[in-house]
Image (cartoon, helix red, strand yellow):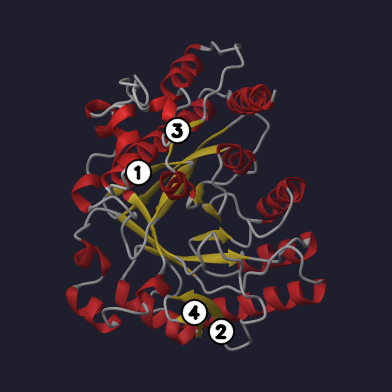
Amino acid sequence: MRFAVTKVCGGGKARAGALHIGGSGIETPALLLSTRKGLPAFVSCDLLASLPLPDSLLLHVCPTHFMEGPPSKTISNIGGLHRMLGLPDHILVAAASDSIESLPASEASNKFGASFETPSGRRLVKPSDYMELISCMKPNLWASLADEVPAWVTEKRNKISVGRTLRWLDACIALDPDSGTNTFAVVVGGSSIEQRKLCATEVSKRNVSGFWIGGFGFGESMEERCNLLNEVTECLPPEKPRLVSRLGLPEEVLEGVAAGIDLFDSTYINQLTMGGFALIFPVDTVQREMLNGVFNKSGADYTKINLRATTYRKDTSRLVDSCSCFTCQNHTRAYLNHLLNVHEMLAQILLEIHNTHHYLCFFRSIRDAIKVGEFDLFRQQFVQNRRAHVTAAVL
């Protein structure tokens, strides 16, 4: 793996970069597409090819999803997850985490291993178990085992979390044939700035390729998160990529980019799709205005629409007129409304295609803003427009 920062925006921390793994190259900031057992919930291998390239090549896979099903040695004999999934050119990043809907079971984890939810209940995963999964799956990159805790735990529990995570990192590296060269070390510490900084400083001393900032989305406030992200990135070497989990909303992504985050992993797209929502904010318009130095001052912002609503029953327009995704090129809002209301799974397939395509374009707009040195203005405008829209909706 090779990573290089290509542009830092002004006096801030927002940065554009290039991540090269094998024969694939990805520009950052970038999004890891969330998967269930290797593929997005409603997007098959052939449909993945219709998404923007190379942006859609990054996939997050959870090793604990494979604890039930084909034995890990069967996956290894097939040739790893790339061969099993039929995705030889995609970049698979493995990290164990519970779903966004459930909080980490801080008391279920212990000094021997971390606890994760599986279809058959909670299971304790030791570093040796975890590395056996990693060895058989053969991902391009993987994050070490970590003891993530929610924001409300005590300072003592935060210290225990950091201690366990560092021990497990060393154990995982010791069991790795490549000695950690494809490893992302996890930074934990709950809502404690002191423990976060300690963990970030310690993992920076290890022979790892990058850093996975975990433990967010578990009860911390927006202000706490901003301070924690900035303090952590200050302690991490700038030449290595940083990845953060569970920051999915557009405002949260922009907050992460402003703190110097390069990669994002969340289930935001899947949550939108399951709820029947479609992203519609004007990504292409923002891109053109940003490149031309012109910004929309109207305050208009239409982030998403609920396609289950009866107002779309006779709406024959596309989700987004300028969108080039398969869904927008072939189907109308009225058709999607119909599919959702008769509980046809095709609705989720078409929505997932559009939402993924749209959000990848959002990340492309962020990169364009950084490249022309206007990220701060881009972020300020986006947040102001969102607030104006929310205020108008309440009134």
Residue 48 in the image: x percent, y percent? 25, 46
> Which of the numbered marks, if any, corresponds to residue 352?
1
Give the position of the N terminus as an image quadrant: bottom left
Sequence order check, earlier mark of 2 and 3: 2
Label 1: state its secondary structure: helix
How far apart are the two marked residues, 2 and 3, measured between alpha carbons?
46 Å
As rendered, which of 102 and 84 lies closer to the eye? 102
For the residues carrying marks 3 and 4, which lies nearer the camera in this image? 3
Judged left or right of residue 318, residue 118 is right
Query: Does 337 appear above or below 202?
Result: above
How far apart are the two marked residues, 2 and 4, measured between alpha carbons?
12 Å
Q: Residues within 10 Å of mark 4 (few under 14, many from 20)?
A: many
For the residues carrying marks 3 and 1, which lies nearer the camera in this image? 3
How far apart are the two marked residues, 1 and 2, measured between alpha carbons?
35 Å
As rendered, which of 310 and 360 lies closer to the eye? 310
> Which of the numbered marks, if any, corresponds to residue 125?
none
Q: Dot 3 corresponds to which residue?
A: 309
How far apart are the two marked residues, 3 and 1, measured between alpha carbons?
18 Å
Give the position of the C terminus as an image quadrant: top right
